[in-house]
Image (spheres, grey):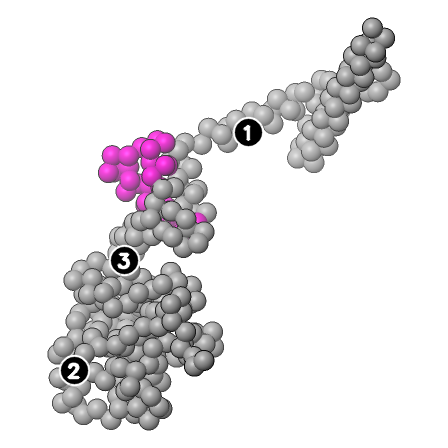
């Protein structure tokens, strides 16, 4: 019986210590958040010990803080969906457009939120399940509504020019493009296909998400294995020499990736790093015959 009473007293003492610790933690936190609300603070001595505990003001403040938290938890599923889309790296205006597009398709509430999260897939490792495509479509619609222009450029397929690895064995082969006659250029460009995209879009994004027959054809040639983070060379394109000064050259990090590309030329660029502007209207680019994906191909000798 003495042991039972002793255990009971010990439990009671432990609970009192935990309660005091909790109250002091809350009060310490709240005093940092709302110091004026905690002044003056009333104290009351607990009948079973000699320690003061906060009663009146602290409990009022705690209730007010919980009320603020509950307001936050009242965020709608649509608001949560917008926050989620922003958290994975997209602009808020685009996130709002994505949610509005899903609402127009008949979704709402938790179903909409679940759909957005499902479409994001394993976004942390670049495994998208459809959100990126929807984002690109929404962004294009917003850009057009804000007055951005449509850029038209021409893409020469691999079989319309000397695009193979054998044609780029040494530096001299880069001169082939510069030495082409006007007749050869004219013949080559008659075989180019036309692509249209809104300014502000990269060539790689046009290949992945672009609309129209031209973008669809480009998609057949350009892989974009790294999701546009400049960690591969699968979106390698060759800028026509006459347009290279307009487009500009690569930065050092891009050059490192281009060294691993299939048959790189002096005017090679990564499609993910070429962002279309109105100055690129009428631009001509060429596609190499192949692509080196570092996941299954390492272009070095043993």
- Percent position (x, y) of residue 204? 32, 65
Instruction: Look at the picture and state if 183 lies above or below 30.
Output: below
| Residue depth check, mark 1 versus mark 3: number of the one nearer the observer | 3
Name the residue located 16 percent from the left edge and 62 percent from the top edge: 213
As measured in the structure, the alpha-carbon distance from the residue carrying label 1 to the one carrying label 3 is: 40 Å
Q: Which residues are magenta?
A: 88-116
Residue that badge 3 annotates? 209
Is the residue under label 2 in contact with that under label 3 (CB below 8 Å)? no
* Label 2 crowd (10 A; few <14 / some 14-19 / many >=20): some
* Residue 263 sits in quarter: bottom left
> In the orientation shown, which residue stands out farthest toward the top?
1
Q: Which mark is residue 198?
A: none
* Label 1 crowd (10 A; few <14 / some 14-19 / many >=20): few
Name the residue located 30 percent from the left edge and 82 percent from the top edge: 165
Task: Name which of mark 1 and mark 3 comes first in the sequence.
Answer: 1
* Residue 48 sits in quarter: top right
- Percent position (x, y) of residue 110? 36, 31
SS of the residue under disc 1: helix
Q: Which mark is residue 188?
A: 2
Is the residue under label 1 in contact with that under label 2 (CB below 8 Å)? no
* In the foreground, 182 or 121: 121
> In the orientation shown, which residue stands out farthest toward the front?
302
* In the foreground, 264 or 76: 264
Name the residue located 83 percent from the left edge and 6 percent from the top edge: 1
Residue that badge 1 annotates? 69
Instruction: Look at the picture and state if 44 lies above or below 180.
Output: above
């Amino acid at each position: 019986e003495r042991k039972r009473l002793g255990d009971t007293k010990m439990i009671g003492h432990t609970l009192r210590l935990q309660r005091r610790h909790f109250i002091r933690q809350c009060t310490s936190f709240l005093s940092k958040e709302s110091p004026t609300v905690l002044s003056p603070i009333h104290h009351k001595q607990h009948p079973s010990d000699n320690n003061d505990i906060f009663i009146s003001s602290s409990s009022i403040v705690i209730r007010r803080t919980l009320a603020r938290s509950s307001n936050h938890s009242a965020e709608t599923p649509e608001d949560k969906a917008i926050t989620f889309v922003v958290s994975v790296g997209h602009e808020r205006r685009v996130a709002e457009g994505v949610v509005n597009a899903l609402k127009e398709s008949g979704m709402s509430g938790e179903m909409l939120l679940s759909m957005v999260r499902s479409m994001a897939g394993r976004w942390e490792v670049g495994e998208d399940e459809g959100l990126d495509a929807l984002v690109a479509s929404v962004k294009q619609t917003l850009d057009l509504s804000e007055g951005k222009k449509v850029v038209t450029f021409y893409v020469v397929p691999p079989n319309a020019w000397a695009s193979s690895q054998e044609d780029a064995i040494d530096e001299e082969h880069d001169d082939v493009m510069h030495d082409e006659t006007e007749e050869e250029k004219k013949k080559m460009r008659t075989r180019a296909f036309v692509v249209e995209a809104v300014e502000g879009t990269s060539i790689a994004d046009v290949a992945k998400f672009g609309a129209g027959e031209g973008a669809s054809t480009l998609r057949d040639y350009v892989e974009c294995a790294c999701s546009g983070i400049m960690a591969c060379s699968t979106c390698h394109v060759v800028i026509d020499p006459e347009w290279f000064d307009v487009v500009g050259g690569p930065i050092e990090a891009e050059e490192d990736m281009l060294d691993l590309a299939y048959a790189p030329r002096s005017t090679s660029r990564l499609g993910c790093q070429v962002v279309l502007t109105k100055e690129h209207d009428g631009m001509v680019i060429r596609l190499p015959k192949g692509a080196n994906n570092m996941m299954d191909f390492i272009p070095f000798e043993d």
